[in-house]
Amino acid sequence: MNALHQVLLAALFSALVFDATYGEEIIHGRKAKKNSLQYMASVQVNGKHKCGGFLIDASYVLTAAHCDDRDNMSVVLGAQDISRNNLVRYVVKSKHKHPSYKDPKTGNDIMLLKLSSSVKQGKFVKIVKIPSKDKPLKPKTKCQVAGWGKTEKQNSVNDLLVTDVSTVSLKDCQKEWAIVKIKPPPNVLCAGGYGTKSGACQGDSGGPLVCSGTAVGIVSFNFNGDCNYPNVPNVYTQISKFTTWIKKTIKKGASTHGEEISNGKKAKKNSLQYMASVQVNEKHKCGEFPIDASYVLTAAHCDEGMNARQQVLLAAVFSTLTYDATHGGEIINGKKAKKNSQKYMASVQVNGKHKCGGFLIDASYVLTAAQCDYRGSMSVVLGAHNISANPLIRYEVKDKHKCLSYKKVSTGDDIMLLELSKKVQQGKPVKIVKIPSKDKPVKPNTKCMVAGWGKTEKQNAVNDLMVTSVSTISDKDCKKKWNNTLPHNVLCAATKSGVCQGDFGGPLVCGGVAVGIASFSSNRDCKHPHVPDVYTQISKYITWIKKIIKKGA
């Protein structure tokens, strides 16, 4: 627990009259009408609702700065009932708190959340307007506030509630707060909780105060957690005071990291082969160029935000590795998967970007390779053949369970269970795949299938699920091909088709049963046949899988 958390914890028990406990409840509210308030966002941490928010740009949600959290943050859009399955969830790519923010009582309680991908507006999701310039709001203006926080009767609600409130003049607001010896911070406005039984309370801070179709305020705090209105006015961050900062942050997010190429032209094919891309969390950050078989040269400022593991992976691109398990296997000589096929397939993503394949074996668990464990916000996309499409059905990863014996790919035990934040509802686009019920060998020359979204023999990356047929190979022949260097508990398969870098973690499916997990191929050589592809044999881990799932239940 860091110092900030200790301070916040202590604050819960102190005699503070400010209450900004990560959200505001809607008191004396009503259930929102269907297809209304389409801008509302549920800001979630580890798949659980924490705060309200609202969509102001295709890539940005606005909320309160005190809603910030160190754990995995995501945003649910287009849902009034946040307890249902198949929620449209966007991973938070980056957080932008106002630089002057310290705590709600000193003001500047505003934060922009940049989403992992742009939101496509439609029937269920729409952007709400915000003020274009700083303009005061007249007292007694009729407005609305909405959220999923607790009410005067319930500790929490899953349905979006809305209530009407009226703005209060800043003079009256300051006068009422002076009675309890508190001075509201600058750049705020007040509404509800005073002269009315409606207002906000703990449970949904970050939500918008909307007047005549424009979001003018962000729910910040009330008096001492007391929701027995009327007492003193609720306090909102006044958005118009931060319009310049909002525009600047969004504009900066749309620009490149570093210098752009002005008035340039697309490079010719097979030219500039020395060029390389320095990336952080799979996102381009800087240019570079190799000067040695093991080194690349780039600018020093490109080191910002790059951890040691990412630096090592960058160097590894040029090293001579025998095993290649670069977090995914490409599908070589494959074809586009048929519609409504391979419904068990999962795209394991980190910070909203595809990292590995996986497959659904239980309503709450996806099976993948242990090598796919990465730092960052991990989620799983199900029910999508095209992972570039919006909206995607995304589930946060609640917990990761790697085989305890796993150390590295070359020593085996390359298997991991991902526990999802909530149960998956099977249907037309999503289904569970069977796995072996007991340890049983797979016969040589068994016809199987492997699928994934990794790069192919022609493309560096694909968004459409690709599938190809392969045949299993006997342990004896596989070991011979690999010069007896194989780890234990694996099986092999190959033809002119197979896997390569881009989608390890995906299943080897034979007769409708997932029998293997794509683990590694040889030295980045995707020109099959060469040596067989290697898969973790699932039947060897059935007892472990059952134990983990039973423990989770």
Image: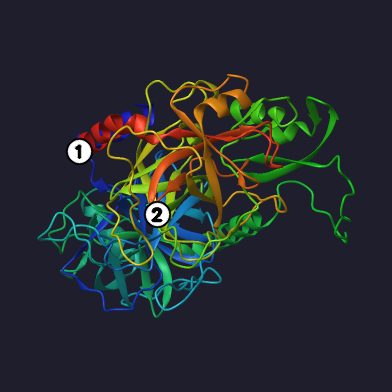
Whether residue 14 appears in this view of the structure is no
Q: Residues within 10 Å of mark 1 (few under 14, many from 20)?
A: few
Q: How far from the left and from the top, in percent, is residue 305?
A: 61, 35
Q: Which mark is residue 15?
A: 1
Badge 1 vs badge 2, beta-carbon distance below 8 Å: no
Q: How far from the left and from the top, in percent, is residue 324?
A: 63, 31
Residue that mark 2 sits on: 344
> Which residue: 71% across, 52% down?
256
> Which residue: 45% across, 72% down?
128
Between residue 17 and residue 275, name the one nearer to us: 275
Between residue 518 and residue 50, name the one nearer to us: 518
Task: State left or right for residue 460 relative to residue 168.
Answer: right
Q: Is residue 345 positioned above or below 190 on the image?
A: above
Q: Residue flagged by tag 2: what amino acid is it?
A: Tyr
Question: Looking at the figure, which quarter contains the N terminus?
Answer: top left
Q: Residue flagged by tag 1: what amino acid is it?
A: Ala
> Which residue: 20% across, 48% down?
224
Whether residue 58 appears in this view of the structure is yes
